[in-house]
Amino acid sequence: MKQTRENHLIIFCKNPILGQCKTRLAASIGAEKALGVYKFLLEHTAKMTQDVSAKRVVYYSNYIEPQDTFDPKVFDKQVQQGKDLGARMAHALNTAFANGAKKAMVIGSDLYDLTPELIHQAFNSLDTHKTVLGPARDGGYYLIGMTQMNSALFENKNWGSSTVLSDTLSNLKPDSPFLLPTKNDIDQVEDLYPEEVFNPLIK
């Protein structure tokens, strides 16, 4: 559980409230099963990030969960602030840089494929690039990191749409970010793989 204070890993999550998380998934499998999947993903995210060499901060959507899968001895806890996802990410990143971060990165909590090795690769890429992005198959991104704040990346975006990644890449020109492998976050029932992991949760 070593922490490198110059690396800040920001984890965005929703409070696990029935009917308020994984709503697209809930349309197919029901709100209770969708909530169960999301709680599983929160546990996975906590386990997967607890040994990443960084200061780890969880940003909740509504309120701080004092006793949940994110151990307060390992994770700092904050509440997201801002009118939309872009403003909330910008606030969290600005806070990280104000607190001494040299590299700051935001990830979500709904990607089963994300690994500590991939996060370390992302941090290492910032030795030679200003920005790192993890493209998602739906046209968004599952990870964004940088060495200095670039507010334009979080403004004038249709968050949740298929244009977020392309619009972000346009903002970065002429610089080229480091691109991680494309991954698929879990939003709909067809995203629930591997089957042996998720089938027991939705039966």
Image (cartoon, grey):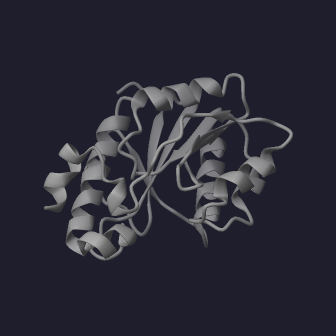
Q: Quadrant of residue 2?
A: top left
Q: Point out the image quarter for the C terminus.
A: bottom left
Residue plotted at (46% across, 51% down)? 108
Q: Quadrant of residue 177?
A: top right
Q: Is residue 124 left or right of residue 186?
A: right
Residue plotted at (64% across, 63% down)? 87
Q: Position of residue 141 (x, y in %)?
A: 57, 50
In this figure, what is the number of numbered marks? Answer: 0
Is any part of residue 52 visible from this angle?
no
**Does 153 appear above or below 51?**
below
Is any part of residue 182 visible from this angle?
yes
Q: Nearer the viewer, residue 79 or 160?
A: 160
Q: Point out the image quarter for the N terminus.
A: top left
Residue plotted at (66% across, 28% down)? 126
Q: Position of residue 147 (x, y in %)?
A: 69, 35
Q: Nearer the viewer, residue 144 or 169?
A: 169
Q: Nearer the viewer, residue 97 or 84?
A: 84
Q: Position of residue 129 (x, y in %)?
A: 72, 29
**Does 161 appear above or below 71?**
below
Q: Residue furthest right?
A: 174
Q: Position of residue 153 (x, y in %)?
A: 72, 53
Q: Nearer the viewer, residue 194 or 22?
A: 194
Residue plotted at (24% across, 52% down)? 40
